[in-house]
Image (spheres, coloured by chain):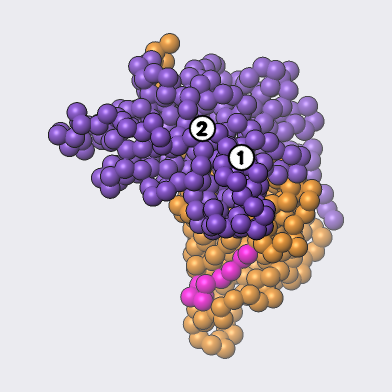
């Protein structure tokens, strides 16, 4: 981090097969999720994932703005992914850019395939994702936060949507890339899984890998998603804990 | 594309939730399988390939012939007959649009107002930002909400404060047979109008409003933890100015508020009742819900 123009490639994989931060190839960064952190929103969640910090808020179903986007047979899902100016080393120029537009679009489409939008015709479900600190994998962190926020908002959907990126680092397939691995690695493959059906509803790839590597990456990513899925559920359980009620009074 | 994993490999969320017993409260999350035992998928669930899953976060509640999940969060879903508190968001020639916390704004036509309103004169009666109590009359297939302001306890709200709680907590606020809300009224001397949409209008002295707001916060935030009634009672007793107590005879006959519900207070308001299922029940039925 730091030096502008520094092109020195760090050692991404030690001879022992450990990664730059000491993780094994199939190891996730530590992840912590909290549901229901904003009072104003209908649903919200905060995710700390490695050095990523992401906040998500969900509003709706509510009136559609702008009006012309309204669909008369279902809710529209509008997503805004945004990185704070202070989320990266070099100040990020605030506002929409091509990258954030793309990420907003693919995340909205991922949710369109799991949310029962037909239940709320002519309305909008608005998902806001704010990246406060970024260290690679923010679209996945944002998706995870938004998915927990949607559940917190009581939105009906097929399932929660865990997401993770797999990549190719120093020739090896590795789970959940961090910044250096993403910058200097050979490939990056973010994905989002519907655990209930086993389907992927987001899959992008940057870089190169062989068909065999892709196949292994998908397996690794799906396994990672299932771990994250459990953490998402735990966060919601904690927020809505139902304590056993003594069988008091008839 | 390699097919490393596709349906077929599906593991779902693990085991299906076994059907809970009558008094048990089981939290389920979207995508979790529910043991349906021949029951049909009801609200809050969906079926794929003969299995029933939860579609929302809520309490798993088999209600033969349906399995359903009762929401614990989310926006207000309107239901005919509900009394709700709303605010005016737009004024047109012949109607007002109200935000009642539902997925869509509800048009209140001038013929549904308690006054004689001429076309174009709507703004003389209600302006943007005004608070009102209305009743949901009908819903159409597109989710349009018809409301009226003609009826007992309905009308424009003056002064007072509106506090929001999640609509799923409203039954808990009312309490069994109206016990909770009656206690709060008696202990604070405040006037309270409960909207089924979770918007609660509170009128009275500054002190009363403050105490009611605090109680509403406790009710709104306490999740599913038991002992709520006790905590509320303790708070109210602790903050009751002693001289005050005898003085409040509840002069609230004219205030717009929920008619039914407060039939009596003393029918076993122990522990914490689960929020009742909100659908299609009269308020008495909902608040005295026991399973």
Decide whether residue A85 is among the magenta residues: yes
Q: Position of residue B46 (x, y in %)?
A: 72, 33
**B227 in relation to B6, above or below:** above
Where does label 1 land, which residue? Answer: B148
Q: Residues within 10 Å of mark 1 (few under 14, many from 20)?
A: many
Instruction: Determine which quarter of the picture holds residue A216.
Output: bottom right
Residue with the most extreme top position: A250
Task: Assign the C terminus of chain A to one quadrant of the image.
Answer: top left
Q: Which residue is painted at 71% across and 43% down in the image?
A: B143
Residue with the most extreme right position: B1
Residue A124 vs residue B287: left or right?
A: right
Residue B125 vs residue B119: left or right?
A: left
User: Is residue A165 something that shows in the picture?
Assistant: no
Q: Mark 1 lies on which chain?
A: B
Instruction: Determine which quarter of the picture holds residue B10.
Output: top right
Q: Which residue is painted at 51% across and 38% down in the image?
A: B154
User: Is residue B115 something that shows in the picture?
Assistant: yes
Secondary structure type for disc 2:
loop
Q: Residues within 10 Å of mark 2 (few under 14, many from 20)?
A: some
Residue A213 vs residue B188: left or right?
A: right
* Chain displayed in orange: A
| Observer-nearest of B47 and B66 | B66
| Observer-nearest of B122 and B189 | B122
Q: Which residue is painted at 69% across and 27% down in the image?
A: B42
Range covered by the magenta-colored residues = A80-88
Residue B152: numbered disc: 2
* Chain displayed in purple: B
Q: Mark 2 lies on which chain?
A: B
Q: Which residue is painted at 56% across and 27% down in the image?
A: B277
């Amino acid at each position: 981090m730091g030096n502008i123009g520094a092109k020195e490639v760090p050692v991404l994989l030690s001879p022992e097969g450990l990664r730059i931060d000491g993780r094994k190839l199939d190891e996730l960064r530590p992840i912590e999720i909290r549901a229901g952190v904003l009072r104003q929103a209908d649903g919200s969640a905060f995710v700390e994932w490695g050095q990523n910090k992401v906040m998500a808020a969900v509003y709706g179903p509510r009136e559609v703005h702008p009006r012309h986007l309204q669909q008369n047979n279902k809710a529209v899902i509008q997503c805004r992914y945004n990185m704070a100016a202070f989320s990266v080393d070099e100040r990020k120029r605030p506002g929409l850019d091509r990258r954030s537009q793309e990420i907003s679009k693919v995340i909205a489409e991922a949710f369109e395939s799991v949310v029962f939008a037909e239940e709320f015709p002519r309305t909008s479900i608005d998902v806001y994702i704010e990246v406060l600190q970024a260290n690679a994998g923010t679209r996945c962190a944002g998706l995870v936060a938004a998915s927990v926020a949607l559940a917190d908002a009581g939105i009906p959907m097929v399932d929660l949507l865990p997401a993770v990126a797999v990549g190719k680092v120093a020739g090896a397939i590795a789970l959940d890339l961090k910044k250096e691995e993403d910058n200097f690695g050979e490939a990056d493959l973010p994905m989002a899984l519907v655990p209930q059906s086993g389907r992927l509803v987001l899959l992008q790839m940057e870089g190169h890998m062989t068909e065999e590597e892709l196949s292994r990456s998908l397996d690794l990513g799906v396994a990672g998603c299932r771990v994250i899925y459990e953490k998402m559920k735990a966060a919601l359980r904690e927020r809505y804990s139902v304590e056993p009620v003594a069988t008091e009074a008839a | 594309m390699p097919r490393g994993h596709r349906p077929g490999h599906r593991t779902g969320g693990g085991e299906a939730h076994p059907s809970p017993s009558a008094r048990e409260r089981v939290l389920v999350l979207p995508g979790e399988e529910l043991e349906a035992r021949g029951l049909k998928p009801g609200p809050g669930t969906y079926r794929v390939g003969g299995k029933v899953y939860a579609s929302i976060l809520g309490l798993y509640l088999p209600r033969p012939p349906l399995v359903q999940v009762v929401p614990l969060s989310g926006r207000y879903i309107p239901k005919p007959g509900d009394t709700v508190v709303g605010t005016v968001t737009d004024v047109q020639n012949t109607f007002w649009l109200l935000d009642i916390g539902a997925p869509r704004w509800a048009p209140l036509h001038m013929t549904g107002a308690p006054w004689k309103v001429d076309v174009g004169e709507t703004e003389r009666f209600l302006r943007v930002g005004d608070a009102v109590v209305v009743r949901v009359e009908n819903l159409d297939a597109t989710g349009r909400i018809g409301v009226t302001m003609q009826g007992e306890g309905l009308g424009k709200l003056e002064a007072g404060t509106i506090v929001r709680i999640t609509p799923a907590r409203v039954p808990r606020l009312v309490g069994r047979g109206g016990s909770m809300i009656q206690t709060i009224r008696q202990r604070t001397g405040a006037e309270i109008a409960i909207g089924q949409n979770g918007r609660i209008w509170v009128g009275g002295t500054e002190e009363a409003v403050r105490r009611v707001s605090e109680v509403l916060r406790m009710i709104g935030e306490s999740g599913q933890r038991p002992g709520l009634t006790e905590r509320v009672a303790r708070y109210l007793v602790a903050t009751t100015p002693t001289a005050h107590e005898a003085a409040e005879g509840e002069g609230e006959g004219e205030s717009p508020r929920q008619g039914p519900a407060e039939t009596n207070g003393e029918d076993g308001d122990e522990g914490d009742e689960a929020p009742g299922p909100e659908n299609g029940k009269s308020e008495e039925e909902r608040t005295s819900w026991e399973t």
